[in-house]
Amino acid sequence: MPYLGPKYEENQISNEIKKIDINLFTYKEYKSHRELCNTVAQKISEGRIVGWFQDRVEFGARALGNRSILADPRNKNIKQIINSKIKKREEFRPFAPSILSEFKNDWFEEEYYNYYMKAVLKIKEEKKTKVPSIVHVDQTCRLQSVEEKNNLKFHMLINCFYKITGVPLILNTSFNENEPIVCSPKEAIDCFLRTKMDDLVLDNRLISRKN
């Protein structure tokens, strides 16, 4: 399991939210994680860019669903949108997908499941046009396979996105701008405020920029 970093308690998250003018945003706390996931999946399907902050920080260089920026892989322009709003990365650098593990073999040719996003796999020919924003020029993707037993919350979110769109994967890049991946609620909020990220999820809380 890669989720070995710090975990922040509810009061720590609440205290950081109190430091910002929440009236500038739309704010909601959810009692049901499924309801939260349904809402966030819908926002992603509509083209919004979401910062996703849950539980313990991932150990290592990859965002694996606890400190992630998420977007719709079907949108051919989403890479440029993420770079203009947040990442400011070079054009040639690709973004990666996270896929429900049970659908991995339907979308990719190799058997390797790649749970830690450490290798590239070739996407099947008939699938590549469905998710143009995460396919490299050589028709490969550096994917993460997500199992329910390893990350229930992230798996649930991708599953909600699948039910809305018919696509069982989501664009997943590290939650940061040009600094190391965020760790604390304060760092997540700071990144959200100084960029043009559309939504921020902190555990069961959703902060959204007003249209």
Image (tube, helix red, strand yellow):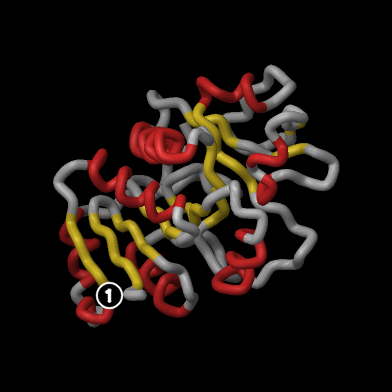
Q: Residue at x 38, y 50 (%)?
A: 42
| Residue 103 against residue 93 in the figure, above or below | above
**Residue 167 x/y as whole percent:** 53, 35
Task: Find residue 155 and report its image quarter.
Answer: top left
The residue positioned farthest toward the right in the image shown? 138
**Residue 191 x/y as whole percent:** 45, 71
Q: Is residue 25 left or right of residue 133?
A: left
**Residue 100 x/y as whole percent:** 50, 29
Q: Classify mark 1: residues with Cα within 10 Å, few (<14), some (14-19) or many (20+).
A: some
Q: Is residue 145 left or right of residue 133?
A: left
For this rendering, which residue is in front, 5 or 131?
A: 131
For this rendering, which residue is in front, 6 or 197?
A: 197
For this rendering, which residue is in front, 112 or 4?
A: 112
Q: Residue at x 72, y 29 (%)?
A: 126
**Residue 141 x/y as whole percent:** 71, 39
What type is the residue that disc 1 sits on?
Phe
Q: Is residue 187 left or right of residue 110?
A: left
Q: Is residue 90 left or right of residue 39?
A: right
| Residue 37 against residue 210 in the figure, above or below | above
Q: Callout 1: helix, strand or loop?
A: strand
The C terminus - image quarter: bottom left
Q: Residue at x 55, y 73 (%)?
A: 85
* Residue bearing the label numbered 1: 25
Number of marks = 1
Q: Residue at x 49, y 59 (%)?
A: 47
For this rendering, which residue is in front, 178 or 108?
A: 108
